[in-house]
Amino acid sequence: MKTTEEILVRIKAALPAAQVELVLNPSPCAQHSLRVAPASAFAVARFLREDAELALDYCSNVTGVDWPGKEVTDKVKTTKIVDGVETVVEEAVKRVEPGCLEVVYHLFSMKHSKDGAQVPVILRMKTENRSDRVELPSLTPVWRSADFQEREVFDLFGVVFKGHHDLRRLLMWDEFEDHPMRRDYVDPDDFEYEPTPHDEVLKRAQQHAAEGCL
Amino acid sequence: MVSNPYFPLVVLFVAALGFGLAPLGLAWLWARLVSPQKPNHIKNAIYECGLESRGDAWVQFRSAYYLYAIIFLIFDVEAVFLVPFAVVFTGLSAAACVAMLVFVLLLAEGLVWAWAKGVLTWS
Amino acid sequence: MAVEPDLKIELGKQGVLVTTLNELYNWGRRSSVWPMQFGLACCAIEMIATTMARYDLARFGAEVFRPSPRQADLMIISGTVTKKMAPQVVRLYNQMAEPRYVIAMGACAISGGPFKQGYNVLKGIDRYIPVDVHIPGCPPRPEALIHAFMTLQKQIDAQPLTGEGRPRHLDAEAMGEFPVPVQGAHDLEPPVNSLVWPLPAPPVPGANG
């Protein structure tokens, strides 16, 4: 069975122009993944499926990950006038690194499945940011089982898959506007009732009683 | 009147009618006296598994069903006519036989036409 | 003009049945409660098991599960009610002919159950339609569903024909049409039907319970 590094070497040999890199997994399971750039994703997927030795013809799972934006503090050397003297001062500059959405594909090979338990080949793709540039190529033409799962990722994360034949919401209704699995999703206030409320629920219940909503 | 041989039949007929109509009458009376009518828009709406029904229910159905039923009916009625004829035809004249034969041949022609049209093959 | 129970039993021993119209009407109603074929999730499997040979719900009068709401008396909400499905459930309840009853089977139908914090889970179907019997459990055993059925039958038996406590279908002022929630941009609108589910006041923090 090929390790992720060997698979990366094979991909680079077959498609030199593809931008693929190894993402190491430091945990004991050591399931490393391959991050592929959106532009070369389709070609890489095609190769992974059609290569005789790899034959990764079964995409068992497509899921999404939300990497929220981070506030990063850089220490920058700038020249400033301090007490009338020009000195080089180190300043802390805050900036916000835009987060991104990531789509993860788990691939198996049905053809080469006779050597027992298989470790999936994991493919990752990142979007540019979380707000407006959220398009990724759809891998449904390569693996049909990605069809509904990409719809689910679109529904719950907001990733728009280009090339998907029918990208609609799957779990939520069509008029729904949020993406529930994002980290900044706030549950709507639907008058949750608990017999012994505490924390958030108690606060909201008292607020409702005070406002006289019901 | 009681000695009339049809009298028991009349009694049974009235009883059968009553047996059917009495529960309906009682239900109607009950509904008028006790149960208030509570119609509303959704209760009277067309059932479509909980969804709002879209479009018309008038769809084009397959004519094969209709033709199957019609052909069965025709030959069933023909059999109903043939059965009493079959019982007494030995006592009838030859002209009666010919008339019946014409009747059967007319219907057979209809069958041949339907067969040629391909109606008898269910696709 | 009710007859005392002892006299009734005595007459019954002699072969004379004495009853009132109310009793007869309620006996007819409770002995032939036909449920609707309506299962949403895991509790539906238990409901199916209850109708099968070992637990046999049919011997209590639930002879046949009707596929159409027009012909059904009882709606057993068995399973998680998602917000996507909730308008359909309410519409089906509205399409049932009176008299109609609801059993909320399982924790999910009562209050959202183990999935209460889910983004698509309705926190209990009694927010939109009136429920007669709630069965706790995840899932409740078939015996629990039979117990709920018998509880419903006892409830029906105790209903008078006129006056206070008469059933909803004999009450001209009782709500007949329950508004169907609309799937809005962030949640169902309205999130709860306050005529059906009045929100109780929260307990004072620090007090018992």
Image (cartoon, rainbow, N blue to C red):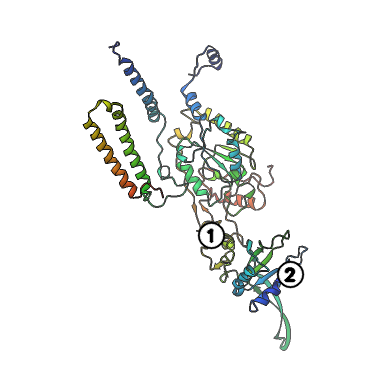
Query: Could you say which disc has been placed on residue A169 in the image?
Result: 1
Residue A169, x across and y down, in percent: 53, 59
Q: Quadrant of residue B89?
A: top left
Tag 2 residue: A24
* Local crowd size for mark 2, using a 10 Å CA cut-off: few (<14), some (14–19), many (≥20): few
Label 1 chain ID:
A
Query: Could you say which disc has been placed on residue C136 in the image?
Result: none
Residue C134, x across and y down, in percent: 59, 38
Q: Quadrant location of the N terminus of chain B?
A: top left
Vertical placement of residue B17 versus C7, above or below = below
Q: Residue furthest bottom?
A: A85
Is residue C205 at least partly visible in the picture? yes
Relative depth, front residue between A49 and A60 = A49
On screen, residue C209 versus residue A174, left or right, reads right
The residue type indicated by label 1 comes to Arg
Relative depth, front residue between B92 and A9 = B92
As measured in the structure, the alpha-carbon distance from the residue carrying label 1 to the one carrying label 2 is 33 Å
- Assign a secondary structure to mark 2: loop
Is residue C175 at least partly visible in the picture? no
Which dot, 1 or 2, sits closer to the camera?
2
Vertical placement of residue C28 versus C44, above or below = above
The residue type indicated by label 2 comes to Leu
Label 2 chain ID:
A
Vertical placement of residue A87 versus C51, above or below = below
Residue C136, x across and y down, in percent: 63, 40
Q: Which of the two discs, 1 and 2, labels the residue nearer the N terminus?
A: 2
Q: Residue furthest right?
A: A28
